[in-house]
Image: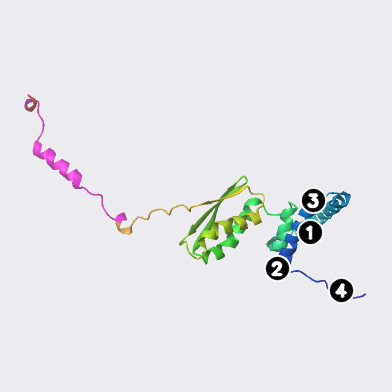
């Protein structure tokens, strides 16, 4: 049995420009009149359907292994294709949470914190706080939206909100402080000085 020929693999850096070029070529093809262009687009659609079905079967085979599914969804190219074919195994809220988790280390280098508030319908609400305006902090909102939409393209909006204020802390000394009795004592002294009221005093 002969040896299998070496297949040239593509890393992420090589895949990205190819995807961009593919989008550009398909865009030009869609605007090209004639039967030849129609046949070419039909061939692309059929290939996409077949490859999508093949990828769906791979995810079915990996369904019994959480680790295998995680490796599939962590790969940037596979995640893109799973989303493209609407067969990503993770629900929307989990994908948004993963996008936030992936962003957190990078944002902390800019002095920023991020947290997922929640996902309602097609809108994700995310809290973002930055300790300063320097060091590229102004570009952080766009970075967050781009990353979240890459994980969840079906979202219609990514709303960034200010984090909820932390609850006020009560000083420990105040817990042991007795209520101020000054006002109560003053009222009591005034009452004693006036003496008891009698009907004769009102005459």
Can residue 192 be seen?
Answer: yes
Q: Which residue is drawn at 78% across and 54% down?
A: 28
**x%, y% of residue 48?**
81, 54
Label of residue 5 in the image: 4
Query: Relative to the observer, which residue lies in front, 121 or 20?
Result: 20
Q: Residues within 10 Å of mark 2 (few under 14, many from 20)?
A: few
For marks 4 and 3, give the one nearer the viewer.
Answer: 3
For marks 3 and 1, give the one nearer the viewer.
Answer: 3
Kindly check if marks 3 and 2 are in contact, taking CB atoms under 8 A apart as contact.
no
Mark positioned earlier in the residue sequence (3 or 1): 3
Query: Relative to the observer, which residue lies in front, 69 or 49?
Result: 49
Q: Is mark 1 on a helix, strand or loop?
A: helix
* Label 4 to label 1: alpha-carbon separation: 23 Å
Mark positioned earlier in the residue sequence (4 or 3): 4
* Label 2 to label 4: alpha-carbon separation: 23 Å
User: Residue 175 lies in magenta, yes or no?
Assistant: yes
Mark positioned earlier in the residue sequence (2 or 4): 4
Kindly check if marks 4 and 1 are in contact, taking CB atoms under 8 A apart as contact.
no
Q: Is mark 4 on a helix, strand or loop?
A: loop
Label of residue 58 in the image: 1
Q: Is residue 128 left or right of residue 66?
A: left
State the residue lying farthest toward the top: 203
Residue on which the image places disc 2: 13
């Amino acid at each position: 049995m002969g040896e299998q020929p070496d297949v040239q693999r593509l890393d992420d850096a090589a895949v990205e420009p190819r995807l961009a070029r593919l989008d550009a070529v398909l865009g030009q093809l869609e605007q090209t009149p004639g039967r030849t262009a129609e046949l070419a687009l039909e061939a692309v659609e059929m290939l996409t359907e077949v490859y999508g079905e093949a990828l769906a079967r791979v995810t079915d085979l990996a369904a019994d292994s959480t680790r295998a599914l995680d490796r599939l969804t962590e790969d940037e190219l596979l995640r893109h294709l799973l989303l493209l074919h609407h067969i990503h195994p993770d629900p929307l809220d989990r994908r948004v949470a993963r996008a936030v988790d992936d962003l957190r280390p990078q944002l902390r280098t800019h002095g920023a914190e991020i947290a997922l508030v929640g996902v309602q319908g097609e809108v994700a609400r995310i809290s973002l706080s930055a300790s300063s305006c320097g060091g590229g902090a102004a570009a952080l909102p766009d970075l967050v939206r781009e990353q979240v939409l890459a994980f969840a393209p079906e979202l219609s909006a990514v709303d960034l909100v200010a984090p909820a204020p932390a609850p006020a802390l009560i000083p420990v000394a105040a817990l042991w402080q007795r209520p101020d009795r000054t006002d109560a004592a003053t009222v009591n002294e005034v009452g004693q000085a006036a003496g008891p009221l009698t009907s004769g005093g009102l005459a």
